[in-house]
Structures are given as C-alpha cells and as structure tokens.
Amino acid sequence: MKRQKQLYEGKAKIIYSTDDPDLVIQYFKDDATAFDGLKKGTLVDKGVINNHVSTKIFQHLEENGVATHFVERLNDREMLVKSLEIIPVEVVFRNVAAGSLCKRLGIEEAKLLAPPIQEFFLKDDPLHDPMINESHIKTFEWATETEVAFLKTSGSKVNQLLTDFFKARGIRLVDFKLEYGRHKGEVLLGDEISPDGCRLWDWKTGEKMDKDRFRFDLGSVEEKYQEVYKLVCGDG
Ligand code: UDP
C-alpha cells in the first residue's frame, strides 16, 4: 500500500490517502509540541518509537476485543489505518493525579484516583481543548447519546487493559487520552497510543517516561521514549 495525496498535517502526524478510499496512512513525525503548540521541538526517532509502540498497543487491544482503526504497520514511520470521521471529543482517563487535574482542582500530584476519573475535552486547538460534559456533547451534536455511552464503556475497558499491559512491563499508567471516529457505521478507537498522549511513570522509581519530560525540560527525553519502546516492544 503506497501513500498518495496528503490529506491533513497535524502536530505529530501526517495523514495520506491510499488507492483504497476506506484506508489511509498515518505517518509519524519527530516533531513535538506542548502547551497548545507554544513549545516546539524535535525528538530524534520519536515518530519511529510512537509508530512501533502504538502498533503493539493496538494489536493488544484488538486481541482483547477493542475495535480500533489499526490495519498494519507498513514500515518504521507509517501505519495503515481505516479512515475515520473523527468524533471531536478527547476521552481522558486518570488513575493517578497529574497535569491539568492537579492545576484545576488543587489535587496533589501522584494521589491515587479510585475509581479512575473519566473526562471529556473538546478537540479544538484555537479554543485550547476546553473541558466539556455529556450535556455539551449532546446539545451541540458532537456525538450521539449511544456514542457517548460507547466512549465511556470502551474507554474504561481500554484503561483496564492498558493498566495491566503497562504494569506487566514495570510502568504505571497514570493517565491518557483517547480519540474515536466513525467508520462504516462503527465507532473505532483511532489516533495513536504512545508516550505523547499517555503519562507513564516507572513503577519502582516514579520517574516520568513520557511527554512531560519534553513539556517541563526534565532532560533525557529521547532516552526515556527509547526505554518505553524497549519495555513495550522488546518481547517481539
Ligand atoms: N493529552 C493529550 N493531548 C491533549 C491533552 C491531553 O494527549 O491535547 C493527554 C496527556 O498527555 C495526558 C492526559 O491526556 O496523558 C491528560 O492530560 P491533562 O488533561 O492533564 O492535560 P495536560 O496537563 O497534558 O495539558
């Protein structure tokens, strides 16, 4: 499968059409952004790592009954996926307090969250991805009631599967963001699942192994992404 026209360029990926109208190619770039694009940088081989890590995770989710857009990894930087009509809602799950939750509610970082917290944000860069609730989603028709119910149950299942998946590899899944889209009447998990969109802490030391290292200039960003890559993909 070869890429044809560029359809869209985002902050970390480019989407290309293919000769099959139902399939597109996600190309993973090394560009990194944070704080709504205010901080920009390049991380050596981030695209390669995120493509491989996402592949492994999508395969794990598919094996456990979660329908995703993943078809196959084509090479180091390209993934063949089903084309989606993106639902403009980011679904966030939090198992441990971090990031915007701490800022917004004054919660101390690292507090265990039981049961896990689930939040929705509107996918809208100019508006800085504001937090929304089910009532907004329904009234503004960003998704139907049935779809919202599906996002919650599917997201919760993904949280359980990924918490166990990372724990088995010595990593604590602190929080993460999911995106879903419609494909031929079905809602599928889309985008990528990588250290760009998950907070991952070393289970023993608590050391951050994700994009927070880039966001807050913690150093060793590429090294920590490589470590996640080895822990996730190292078993073949
Ligand atoms: N996240 C993301 N893209 C976004 C916003 C958040 O991938 O546009 C991820 C982020 O990496 C973290 C989780 O969602 O794993 C929760 O993010 P949070 O709301 O704490 O926002 P942040 O502090 O990252 O701005």
Image: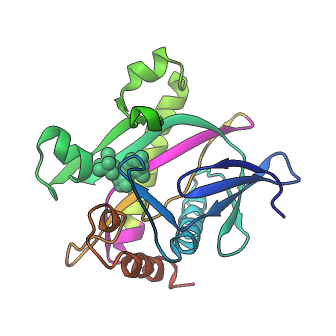
* Residue that sits furthest to the right in the current view: 19
Quadrant containing the N terminus is bottom right
The mark total stands at 0
Q: Quadrant of residue 21?
A: top right
Way the structure is coloured: rainbow
Quadrant containing the C terminus is bottom right
Above-or-below relation of 233 to 35: below
Residue visible at 41% across and 31% down?
Answer: 127
Residue visible at 12% across and 46% down?
Answer: 107
Q: Is residue 165 left or right of residue 186?
A: left
Residue visible at 70% across and 55% down?
Answer: 81
Residue 172 in view (yes/no): yes
Residue 39 in percent (x, y) is at: 37, 56
* Residue that sits furthest to the top in the current view: 139
Q: Is residue 41 left or right of residue 187?
A: left
Residue 176 in view (yes/no): no
Residue 98 in percent (x, y) is at: 22, 54
Front-most of 108 and 235?
108
Name the magenta segment's main secondary structure.
strand
Residue 60 inside the magenta-drawn segment: no
Q: Is residue 158 left or right of residue 24?
A: left
Front-most of 104 and 12?
12
Above-or-below relation of 104 to 30: above
Residue 103 in percent (x, y) is at: 18, 44
Q: Magenta residues, as a range?
A: 165-184
Front-most of 122 and 181?
122
